Amino acid sequence: MATTTYDGSNPVGQQNHGDYQASPTSGGARNINARDGEIHPGEIAVGVVIGRASEYFDFFVYAIASVLVFPSLFFPFDDRLDATLYSFVIFSFAFIARPFGTVLFMWVQRRYSREAKLTLALFLLGTSTVGIAFLPTYAQAGNTGIILLALFRICQGMAQGGSWDGLPSLLALNAPHNKRGWYAMLGQLGAPVGFIVAAGIFAYMLANLSGLDFLDWGWRFPFFVAFAINVVALFARLRLVSTPEYSRLLDERELEPVSLSELSHTQGRNVLIGALAALASYALFHLVTVFPLSWVQLYSNRAMDSFLVLQMWGAGLAIVGTIASGLIADRFGRRTTLGTLAALIAVFSGFVPTLLQGGETGQNIFILVGFALLGLSYGQAAGAVTANFAPRHRYTGAALTSDLSWLVGAAFAPLVALGLSANFGLGYVSLYLLSGAVGSLAALSLNRALEIRD
């Protein structure tokens, strides 16, 4: 297979596909993604989809366990509601740690290499995930089990911050101008796909194991699966980002980390607007995945395995919505798409109490409509203000914008929603979701230049 060489004549920040010459030497598997020196957006999309899907699967394995498992095993000394709230507190630790992980691992990249950073981050993620599978429960180790769970969760967050490989930004920058929305949504498909696989495993375990067996050993199996997927994803992603062609293209686009002080001094406004622009999507994210699972378990007689299957159908609608968002954004613009969906989410927020208290039919409607809205909005949530960053700051800016979006919009959503609904009623969950939609609309109004033009 022919390899390619770059003659260095292309100025930084410009793309040039004419300065490559084939070499007769064989480059093996490392260059399997290069075709005559040109990397197509579809090839970059492979790395984006692999990376995001593996991370979201790991994410949802922990999220589901934080409702179905951890309250009973790590907080048995309190009632079910408070135990779930404690579990959600630890759930939020990963989102708090994530920006710190981004900063730390970007230092590793500047000091060593992109491959070293990605290897260390995914190794930490896999180790933390499989470590949770071996954790002793409160009955076995007392508070030590809780402390270890919290530490592993923090490590997961640090690792997720460090797993940023720059491929989503690279995809946005190299996609055809009239298909930016289409390519932007590809990485977002990882969320519903990851949820379907994670929920499917837990639903299968719940349906085929006794309650005692599930809490004894069955819940640990999905964490082993997550570890195995992380290993496969690590090699798949390294195989892409370590090739000369990808390294050259990342460097050419100036997709290299910069210091936090430089970013905050020159791009602080863009980071803030980016974190708030998709706030409605991130708030809705956990209000249709994690929160209803906890609310139904506490206040409904529905079987958890069947409810997980319902959520899997909802995630299927989210896949359709995510794909549709690419077509809609390319037709009407990303800013218009995000703004319209934020307004629809605001309308949807008013029906939260009626639907969740409307029996199985109402709950089904809430899940299916909520997931459909999530797919349409979340499909364009990533990198919403990538165009606003100067080329030098795109790599770090995109990563930290995503971290802050998760922190502000999603980190405490299950905790706040369950706490408010239990103590004050579901109407306050409506207000919480409404506030996210208002935040998105306000940020979008401040950013009049936001369009699909990266």
Image (cartoon, rainbow, N blue to C red):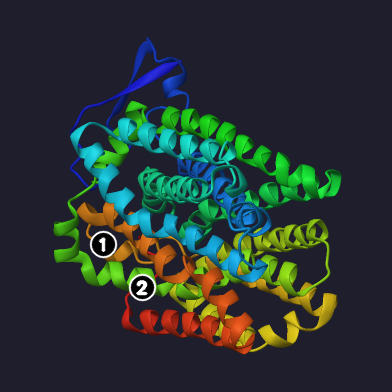
Question: Which residue is found at the position 64% from the left and 60% from the top?
Answer: 67
**Callout 2: SS:** loop
- Give the labeled residue for mark 1: 389
Q: Quadrant of residue 401?
A: bottom left
- Give the labeled residue for mark 2: 450
Q: Is residue 400 left or right of residue 341?
A: left
Three-letter code, disc 1: Phe
Three-letter code, disc 2: Leu
Q: Quadrant of residue 368?
A: bottom right
Q: Is residue 319 left or right of residue 238?
A: right
Q: Earlier in the sequence, mark 1 or mark 2?
A: 1
**How many labels sit on residues?**
2
Residue 53, percent across and down? 56, 46
**Disc 1 to disc 2, C-alpha distance:** 11 Å
Question: Which residue is found at the position 62% from the left and 47% from the top?
Answer: 139
Q: Quadrant of residue 122?
A: top left
Q: Is residue 110 left or right of residue 77?
A: left
